[in-house]
Amino acid sequence: METKYTHLALIAGLVTTSACLVAGGLKAVPFFPQIAISSTILLFIIFRSIAHGGSIFHPAPLVALIMIWSIAISPLASVVWDKYIEYSPKEIDWQPWLIYTSWIYTVCTLALLIGINLSQSQNAEPLPAWGINKKNLPAICMIFMGLSLATQAYIFLQFGGIYGYLSTWSEERATFKGLGSTFMLAEAFPILAFISFVLLTDRETIRKKAWLVYALLLVFFLLKLLFGGFRGSRSNTIWGIFWAAGIIHLVYFKLRLRHYLIGLAFLFSFMVTYAVYKSFGVEAFSGQYTVEDSGRFDGNPVQGILLEDFSRAGVHAYILHEYLYSDTYDLKFGSTYMNALFKVMPFIDNPFPASKNTAGAELFYGRMVDPILSYGNIRNSRVFGLYGEGLLNFGPVLPISLFLVAGFLIGKVNDLCLRLQPEDPRALMIPFVSNACLILILSDSDNLVFFLMKNGMFAFLLILMISTRAVPTTCKASP
């Protein structure tokens, strides 16, 4: 069976590499072996997982699919499109450094595969399914949704209604500082309502009404905008829709190619439109502004989204160059990870002031940054990813081993997700867990901690409280 996956991956990898050579011309030649090796490995992960019942909403296929772009192809795309990083502190000879980066990516991809293989379990038996406490289910769902809805209503009232809320965000965003815990509860409402609907209704009845499922997804999208989406976070809305679409796929009916194509078109359209809102606030609704006015994406929105949101190649090439030519940067040896963890611990002063923001600013701009004096004052919108933050802490070589650890973790989680039975309420968390695995690779430790706490905590608590644990059966010995 493994041979079958290998053959499929080799053929698909060859097609992917050939397409890159055709599109990239001579510029693609130095990237040929890296793309061939990386894409084949990632496609092998996808095919094997799908053959065992996985989908794009499961951890391993989702991570591998996005990595085909972000790891295998994006270094070449950056060179072909002559787009690297926005507001680069200085220009470097980008092409050779992107070639070095692509070779590092290739080794990282191999480490990921080894980690996933090490995590493979021979036990493919379904996990004992948790049940649902139907007696307490309505009351618990109403309590969770009621608390969340009341918190959001309180926020709107504090800012003079919905329009006042949007205006405040547009003109005085600093006013929202310190409301993180309040937003965390309020903005959980859409997913709490969605999960409650799934739990409280008959699946077979809803499954027969596709129009109702589509309407449910549309309402969810509008709720995501109202509950946090208009506060300047594209990811808050996009990842929420991914979670809802994943639940539809796992609970009601399998999504088809047309659904994915529509979703992809919506993703790019939404991200481009939202860039205008993020730049001009409520004034964006006047219709006077376009994406060109926002100054984002440097002229081509699609290229900008692919290279800025779904790739870290330019950032990695730059910090690799700066680290190897710097004699002033001090490695942080895990301090940025500890900083991210302590950020969510209440009533405790963070003993690790060196964040990824201060570390990144220090390496990016070639100047020393005192993390204590500057704590909280360094604003950095750059995301470094698993390899990039690893470089800030340990240099350019050791972070490759982080992909081994990440692969082992993703493989274990993927295995558990595949063994969950459809009726198990924990299965409703699968798209969220898959999303977290992707953020582990593409984003930084503080983004991951924030995502887990803000987006997943209350949904997890809801499922935990409405569930009845499966009791393992024990066989009695014969007398």
Image: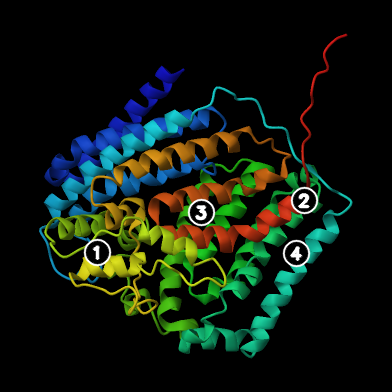
Q: Amino acid at mark 1?
A: Ile
Residue shown at 47% from the left, 28% from the top = 48
| Sooner in the amino-acid sequence: mark 4 or mark 3 | 4
Question: Nearest the camera: 388 or 167?
Answer: 388
Q: Which residue is mark 4?
A: 144
Instruction: Find the residue positioned furthest to the top.
Output: 479
Residue 369, picture quadrant = bottom left
Q: Amino acid at mark 4?
A: Phe
Mark 4 or mark 3, whichever is nearer to me: 4
Task: Say if mark 2 contacts mark 3, CB within 8 Å.
Answer: no
| Spatial CA span between label 2 and label 3 | 25 Å
Q: Which residue is mark 2?
A: 199
| Sooner in the amino-acid sequence: mark 2 or mark 3 | 2
Q: Which residue is mark 1?
A: 85
Residue shown at 23% from the left, 43% from the top = 104
Q: Position of residue 427 (x, y in %)?
A: 66, 43
